[in-house]
Image (cartoon, helix red, strand yellow):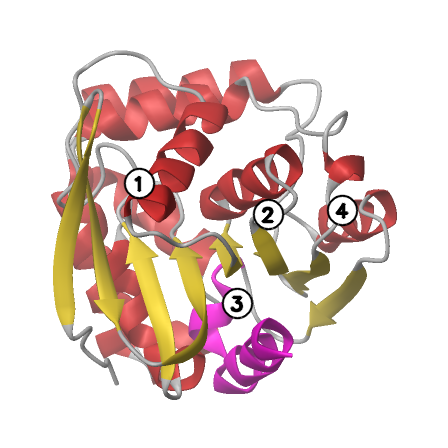
Amino acid sequence: MTAQFAETGSVTLRWGRLAYRRTRGEGSPTVLLHPLALDSRMWELALGELGGGRDVIAIDLRGHGSSDWDGEPFTIADLASDVAGLLQSLSIDRCDLAGMSMGGCVAMTLAASQPGLVRNLALCDTTAWYGAEARVNWEERARAAEEKPRAELLPFQTKRWFSEAFRERSPEAVAHVVDIFVQTRGDVHAQACRALGAFDARPAIGKITSRTLALTGEEDYATPPAMGQALADAIPGAAFKQWPGVRHFSIVESAALRTYVAKHLSA
């Protein structure tokens, strides 16, 4: 079941508008960063547990959802800078931060570059580096995003995102994510793929000072548990948790996991 954010807004950066959704509440703001080719609406599936009276801000990364894109290439570091710019515009100088997949790449980059900004950090089904063949593999996916109709990409995506059991048990949740994916522009999707292909945060993540949790679904073969463990090994004081029976979108599949993440972020 989805929960709605109470308000929408945007800030203007040098390249255009960066959009966000917000539910105001108590405590340190919790900032949520979505995966590749989705947007802040996907967090409606998790807001029940991650909200809980907190001040929650879910951002549409550049080109995704209601955010603009000027057509220029961007990097993961650029996306992290966008998030920092939005928080500065909202007069937020300290937050708790959670990112899924590509959103996790952005989150770790921001936490490494601005250590004082992030208090608690949750890195969900993500990695600091996609491996030696990353550029080749992500370029292949970028070309598919540019050349194929969105619906043709869905079988590949949904099998990676969700376990078979979840797809059978929760078709409404799957449909919610699919609808967002289909609406995402192919050229933005392609540029984000190329940004991930070039991404390597391994030299930087040792600078993270946030209280950090790296979490990976047991059945995630997009960013396998070994990648999550590598994050925890490289980030000072970080913990790693492997969650049973879920795939790449583990935080969508499991309410218990969402509660676990919420406790980490609010501690």
Asked if labels 2 and 4 touch by Cβ distance under 8 angstroms, the answer is yes
Q: Mark 3 against mark 2, which lies toward the viewer?
A: 2
Which residue is drawn at the image coordinates 47% and 61% (left, top)?
249
CA distance separating discs 3 and 2 = 11 Å
* Residue topped by disc 2: 126
Where residue 201 sits: x, y (%)?
67, 29
Query: As shown in the figure, which amino acid type bears the numbered disc 1?
Result: Leu
> Where does the C terminus fall, quadrant-wise?
bottom right
In front of the other: 94 or 71: 94
Which residue is drawn at the image coordinates 50% and 39% (left, top)?
106
In front of the other: 167 or 42: 42
Quadrant in the picture for residue 198: top right
Disc 1 crowd rating (10 Å Cα; few below 14, some 14-19, many 20+) is many
Asked if labels 2 and 3 touch by Cβ distance under 8 angstroms, the answer is no
Mark 3 secondary-structure assignment: helix
Q: Which mark is residue 250?
A: 3
Residue 122: tell me if it is visible: no
The magenta stretch spans which residues? 248-267
Which residue is drawn at the image coordinates 53% and 45% (left, top)?
107
* Residue topped by disc 1: 61
In front of the other: 122 or 110: 110
Where residue 33 sits: x, y (%)?
41, 52
From the viewer's perspective, is 159 left or right of 171?
right
CA distance separating discs 4 and 3 = 17 Å
CA distance separating discs 1 and 3 = 20 Å
